[in-house]
Image: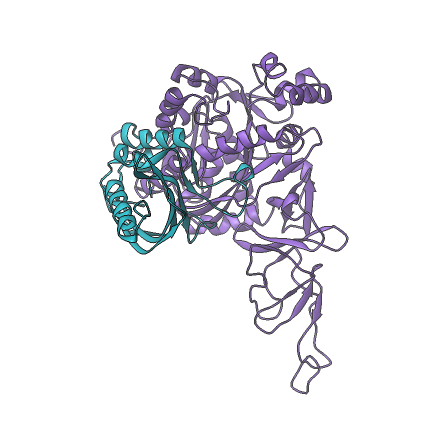
Amino acid sequence: MASTLTRAEAEALLYREARLLDTRQLDEWQTLFAEDGVYWIPIDETKPISENASLIYDSPARRDERVYHLLHTVFPAQTPPSRLLHFINNVEVEGRGDSEAVIHSNQIIYETRLGDFSQYGLGELRPIVASMRHEMRLVDGAWKIALKQILLINREMPQGNLTFII
Amino acid sequence: MNAFDNAGSLGAEGENRDELVRTAPHAFRVHTRAYTDAEVFAREQKQIFGKIWVYVGHESEIPAAYDWKTSHIGTQPIIVTRDQEGRLGAFLNRCAHRGASICREAKGNSKSFTCPYHAWTYGIDGKLTGIPYHHEPNGYSEHFQMPEGLYRIPKVESYRGFIFASLNSKVQPLLDQLGTAKLMIDRRVERSPVGELVLRSVPYVARFKGNWKFQSENIVDGYHFIQTHYAFVKLQEKYQDTTGDFGVHKGASISEMRKHRIQGTVYGCPQGHGINFRRAANIDDLVTGEYADYHKELRALRGEEEFGWIIGTNAASIFPNMGMIHQQIRTWRPVSPDVTEVRIYLYDVKGAPDRLNEGWLRSQERFYGPAGHGMADDVEMFAVNQQGLEASAMDWLILDRGIDQEKLLDNGDYEGMLSSETAQRAFWRRYSKLMEQA
């Protein structure tokens, strides 16, 4: 079936997303999402969202706000800014008929803050380790992200600065 | 000597190396060592965390018989329990035998605790109930002085669901230590028509590079908001309520938010608490708006005057390790002079409409947590502060703001203006009194 998402296509989508995030092309990253696409980093993914706080639960408006915050304002937690590099592994595609698919992947993202590396919190290399679930939807012939869910392996534990897009 | 060589010293250096807080008319200074020194940190454990009531958890975290959770009193790891009769207890998380940690999970429900090392077993009431191979020939003799059980924390009490414990059996009554902080707890609890707050599942946890006292000072620091959180103020101006502020941060422009930040009164308590009270200005809107039924019910229950205070934007730093702001209970524990762990527990106001509770939840999620648009900047500033104090050739920090406007009330509280440093001075007055006690 022509509209089934292949693993090669899924990998290409994930690689492109990673490159946009690593190069801070965040407006472009926004275009990967479906109109109602959600960006979600839960603490407890098994509990109802309405009763539980997440690390991030971004509806489209909130995702837009997060991107605006990063690109157009100056704030202490990103001054100096983070530099990121995504590594992607274990890609699997779970087909869901003609117009939906789920991409599973494991990702390691290395993050470091620039600036005077003699100071606390700057110049350290920090790994962020997660399994990701991209729920994809075919919209006008293009695969869009309906949900990007990130399960950090240490999601219930103390977190460092996560004021960038994973 | 250049007058600016050691700004803030208020004159010649004293001989007293232990001096951590120095006051003079119109001035209030804190020494760098109070945030950085390992000896000061050890003394805090003994003189503060070892002597007074410390917040250790909330009853809604251990609602049923045999529930327990781990917690801390300063650096001391403890277990907080609810026994078969529903009574609260607390014990050091340490086997009486050779010291192994008894609980390795953060919370649970069990009738007994078994040490993972030699399997000594204790009841939920802490009593030692079993020693493997006790009476074998190579076991314990008839003269063995068997411990009664786990080391029991001498004092454990709850005030309206907030559990406090003390290592000091002669500690003052809890309500005496709470002082005006009792009113803060009351006002938050009484947002619930049935008088109950219920903590939500998993807290936000940050382990930051910075001294614990930065968090005590900052949760009621009205002065930093517009500066540290300037980007958030810009977001608020641009996105208003579309991204779920839910009225929490009050105001949709920079000037409105700044105005809001200087309204209200701050109380600096002799017990070390700093409390901001702002009475709600929009009562008419609340009792006619979307949640009119809830607000009208509360107004009828609490009376017009107190309703305004209950529903207002209050915040407190409750000495030494607890904070209340918005829809959260915050607690922090010192790990070392320059490392602190802070937990933010969000709660449900029982009896409030579900949509209101969810709205508050999403609003807290937007600002707090490691990816939030506010908290991450505060945590960053704590590290920046700790970093700055590496420059220890300069001695003193300046906490003079609003000192001439604050006045001493009959109950011992100082009343000051919001965005002054009245709350922070109260913290340090209590701190230095405790640290100097024999």
Q: Position of residue A13 (x, y in %)?
A: 27, 45
| Chain corresponding to cyan in the figure | A
Residue A73 position in % (x across, y down): 30, 28
In the shown orientation, is residue B135 left or right of residue B280? right
Residue furthest front as drawn: A1
Q: Farthest residue toward the right?
A: B85
Q: Is residue B343 left or right of residue B66?
A: left
Q: Residue at x 24, y 46 (%)?
A: A117
Depth check, front residue: A44 or A101: A101
* Residue situated furthest top in the rendering: B284
A103, B193: nearer the viewer: A103
Residue B4 makes an appearance in the image: no
Q: Nearer the viewer, residue A153 or B112?
A: A153
Nearest the viewer among A21 and B376 is: A21
Q: Where B15 sits versus A128, above or below?
A: above
Q: How is the image coloured?
A: by chain
Residue A49 in percent (x, y) is at 52, 39
Figure quadrant of the N terminus of chain B:
top left
Is residue B251 visible in this depiction of the protein? yes
Question: Could you say where residue B97 lies in the image, as x and y percent from the top left?
Answer: 61, 70
Chain B: its colour in the image is purple
The answer to whether residue A36 is above or below residue A133 is above
Snapshot quadrant of residue B206: top left
Across the whole image, how many numbered discs are drawn on residues?
Answer: 0
